[in-house]
């Protein structure tokens, strides 16, 4: 889909929902990338996650932003296919093809100067719970030492549209954007741990009343 | 009706000369006060730290946006005012439901809670007074708990039903009263001869009343703050809101009563004496609204109700006084007019 049409449709369909019906409580927006190559990593609790992240980017960054999505899931219906690969301009990953093929796809995108949006948890978790992070992002960071990895923690979207539900209930979402991380020469596990630390710290900074454990 | 005609009727044509003089004066004064505020912030820039300067700039900018949006919607006509109030009500309810604990099983019920907003405003716009007064209380106390029962989760049932009910009453119901003010004079039985002072014009009585309510409520917040800062020593509700002092409260009470007396002849069909009484009512209820919201925030262990308004905090922080003063003012005015 041509960039201009994508931009207009996004502004008409997605932004009003994200900004008005959901509502964002933003912190650290200036940390977000203005251009590629870069990687944005976030926790994953809802289909709304990608919509919110894309809404936060400026026009230059939006143009080259490529969310990474599982092909087998998002080609299920024509509508989903259009939304994901047309409107949101996602990169489709074949989950059965193995790590090397996926890595190659992502590397090519970075070569083209694009901004990847990745979810290291792998799949949507239970509302507002944090799962263990997979190691792919660390491998990406190691393969391109100057590559900035922007961590973003989001809370509340799992309440607005959790996994398995179709009804959107308006809830304000907290978004914390952290300073960019770079490969620091240590192990992949260390890098992944740095990411986890950011997510855990962000979660601890939330007001106690709305922490996941208390919302049964 | 053809499209241009219906658009014109949606946009009640207003030319400035058509506004009653009292209203014009007050609008000019408000614009003047805002300009003064903005000017003073810029004047004091060298004496302030960078972060406080930026915060003050953001605060003033938000004041301008809120004043222009609200004033513009009010002057543009009842339908615009209603749309804005319904939107504010939605944002306030959303903010409230985002700060309180909710259960996963509450989701569908919350969806139904939001649906009360268009229903409420349809009732208002169609002048259904009895249903307007009864709908939210009945909906919140009868339908909401029933829908929660259908969801089947009894663990935390009372907390959920109590919270949602309170939220609906506080946001949707209270703000509905602000909108209904615009219709009140159309429903009164012509008893305006009982009150002294010229009426501000047939189409604008409601507009004047709403301006009066909102100006006095917001001014009361400012007065309480200024008096408290200058002379405040003894606290009133120290555990809930350490910032509230007797000096602030009483100073605000008197100042708002005086303001109410001054504004009444300009904006309402009432005399200055009645204006004093209304000012006192608004000041006292505004204080109550403020401290109740403070208590709620302390219970939830949060400092601001949200961050929707740059430089101010959340919407609930801004309208907490109005949420109590509006229904009381509405009924006081209704008694006076009927």
Image (cartoon, rainbow, N blue to C red):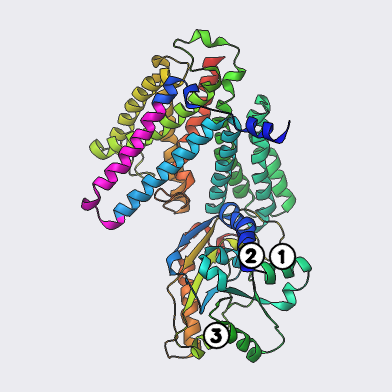
| Between marks 1 and 3 in the image, the one whose residue lies nearer the viewer | 3
User: In this view of the protein, which residue sits in the foreground, A119 or A192?
Assistant: A119
Dominant secondary structure, magenta: helix
Local crowd size for mark 1, using a 10 Å CA cut-off: few (<14), some (14–19), many (≥20): few
Classed neighbour count for the residue bearing mark 3: other residues with Cα under 10 Å, few (<14), some (14–19), many (≥20):
few
> How far apart, in angstroms, are the residues tagged by discs 1 and 2?
27 Å
Residue B114 placed where, x, y %? 64, 45
Instruction: Name the chain letter of the residue that bears numbered label 1.
Output: A
Q: Quadrant of the C terminus of chain B?
A: top right
Residue B283 showing in the rendered view: no
Discs 1 and 3 carry the same chain letter: yes
Element type at mark 1: loop
Q: Which residues are magenta?
A: B26-51
- The residue tagged 2 is A6
Residue B249: quarter of image: top left
Reading the image, the residue beneath label 1 is A164
The residue drawn where x is 47% and y is 83% is: A147
């Amino acid at each position: 889909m041509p960039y201009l049409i994508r931009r207009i449709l996004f502004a008409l369909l997605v932004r009003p929902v994200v900004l008005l019906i959901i509502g964002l409580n933003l912190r650290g927006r200036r940390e977000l990338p203005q251009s590629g190559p870069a990687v944005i990593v976030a926790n994953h609790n809802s289909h709304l996650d990608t919509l919110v992240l894309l809404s936060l980017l400026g026009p230059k960054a939006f143009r080259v932003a490529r969310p990474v999505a599982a092909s087998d899931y998002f080609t299920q219906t024509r509508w989903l296919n259009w939304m994901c690969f047309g409107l949101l301009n996602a990169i489709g990953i074949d989950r059965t093809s193995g790590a090397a093929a996926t890595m190659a796809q992502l590397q090519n995108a970075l070569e083209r100067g694009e901004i990847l949006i990745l979810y290291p948890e792998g799949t949507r978790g239970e509302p507002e719970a944090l799962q263990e992070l997979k190691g792919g992002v660390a491998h990406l960071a190691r393969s391109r030492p100057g590559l900035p990895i922007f961590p973003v923690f989001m809370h509340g979207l799992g309440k607005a549209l959790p996994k398995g539900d179709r009804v959107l209930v308006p809830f304000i979402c907290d978004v914390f954007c952290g300073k960019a991380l770079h490969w620091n020469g240590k192990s992949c596990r260390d890098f992944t741990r740095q990411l986890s630390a950011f997510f855990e710290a962000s979660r601890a900074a939330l007001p106690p009343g709305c922490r996941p454990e208390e919302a049964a | 009706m053809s499209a241009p005609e219906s658009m014109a009727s949606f946009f009640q044509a207003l030319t400035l000369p058509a506004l009653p003089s009292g209203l014009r004066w007050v609008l000019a004064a408000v614009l003047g006060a805002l300009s003064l505020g903005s000017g003073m912030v810029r004047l004091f820039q060298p004496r302030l730290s960078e972060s406080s300067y930026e915060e003050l700039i953001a605060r003033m900018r938000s004041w301008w946006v809120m004043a222009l949006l609200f004033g513009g919607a009010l002057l543009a006509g009842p339908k615009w005012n209603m749309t804005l109030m319904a939107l504010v009500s939605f944002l306030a309810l959303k903010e409230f439901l985002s700060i309180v604990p909710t259960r996963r099983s509450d989701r569908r019920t919350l969806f139904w809670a939001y649906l009360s907003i268009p229903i409420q405003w349809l009732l208002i716009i169609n002048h259904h007074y009895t249903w307007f007064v009864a709908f939210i209380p009945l909906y919140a106390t009868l339908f909401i708990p029933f829908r929660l029962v259908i969801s089947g989760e009894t663990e935390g049932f009372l907390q959920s039903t109590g919270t949602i009910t309170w939220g609906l009453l506080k946001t949707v119901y209270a703000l509905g009263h602000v909108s209904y003010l615009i219709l009140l004079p159309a429903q009164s039985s012509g008893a305006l001869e009982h009150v002294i002072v010229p009426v501000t014009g047939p189409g604008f009585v409601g507009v004047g009343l709403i301006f009066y309510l909102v100006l006095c409520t917001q001014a009361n917040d400012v007065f309480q703050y200024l008096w408290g800062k200058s002379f405040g020593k003894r606290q009133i509700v120290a555990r809930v809101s350490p910032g509230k002092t007797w000096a602030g409260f009483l100073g605000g009470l008197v100042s708002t009563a005086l303001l109410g007396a001054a504004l009444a002849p300009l904006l309402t069909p009432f005399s200055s004496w009645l204006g004093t009484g209304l000012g006192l009512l608004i000041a006292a209820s505004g204080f109550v609204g403020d401290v109740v919201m403070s208590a709620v925030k302390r219970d939830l262990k949060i400092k601001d109700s949200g961050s929707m308004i740059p430089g101010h905090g959340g919407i609930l922080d801004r309208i907490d006084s109005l949420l109590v003063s509006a229904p009381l003012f509405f009924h006081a005015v209704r008694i006076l007019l009927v």
